[in-house]
Amino acid sequence: MMNTIKKHKNIASYKFHHIDTDKCKRCTQFSCEEACFRGIYKVINKNSEPRCTVVENREDRCVKCHICTTACKFEAITID
């Protein structure tokens, strides 16, 4: 999976979260931010070109429950 992800230039890759920022641009609900009970995600530029980011120093709190991946209707988030 990681090799496939690295081939796309619009993928923001963190330790084990990967976010397709092109898909984020179409988002209006920001479900990832609200669905994650660990506060892993923050959506920036909500009023222009939204982009989901992983909050600094929070990624290790992730329990890989995949609530975020199912909440995102554009399937922009992958976890490995």
Image (spheres, grey):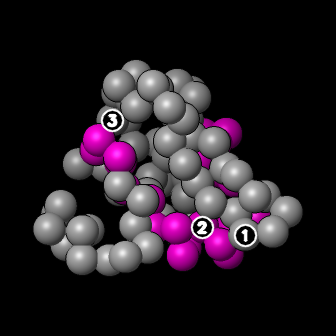
User: What residue did someone put label 1 on?
Assistant: 49
User: What residue did someone put label 3 on?
Assistant: 64
> Disc 3 or 1, which lies upstream in sequence?
1
Q: Is residue 5 above or below residue 45?
A: below
Q: Which residues are magenta?
A: 14-35
Label 1 sits on a secondary structure element that is: loop
Q: In the rendered image, is residue 75 in sight?
A: no
Of the pair 23 and 63, the residue shown nearer to us: 23
| Real-space Cα separation, disc 3 to disc 1, in angstroms | 27 Å
Q: Position of residue 6 (x, y in %)?
A: 24, 68
> Disc 2 or 1, which lies upstream in sequence?
2
Residue neighbourhood size for the residue with mark 2, other residues' Cα within 10 Å, grouped as few (<14), some (14–19), many (≥20): many
Residue neighbourhood size for the residue with mark 3, other residues' Cα within 10 Å, grouped as few (<14), some (14–19), many (≥20): few
| Real-space Cα separation, disc 2 to disc 3, in angstroms | 20 Å
Q: Position of residue 51 (x, y in %)?
A: 62, 60
Amino acid carrying label 2: it is Cys
User: Residue 26 occupies which quadrant of the picture?
Assistant: bottom right
Which residue is located at x 35 percent, y 25 percent?
60
Say if mark 2 contacts mark 1, CB within 8 Å.
yes
The reply to whether the magenta stretch includes residue 10 is no
Q: Is residue 70 above or below residue 60?
A: below
Mark 2 vs mark 3: in front: 2
Label 2 sits on a secondary structure element that is: helix
Which residue is located at x 28 percent, y 44 percent?
16
For residue 24, which numbered disc appears in the image?
2
Q: Position of residue 17 (x, y in %)?
A: 35, 48
Amino acid carrying label 3: it is Lys
Label 3 sits on a secondary structure element that is: loop
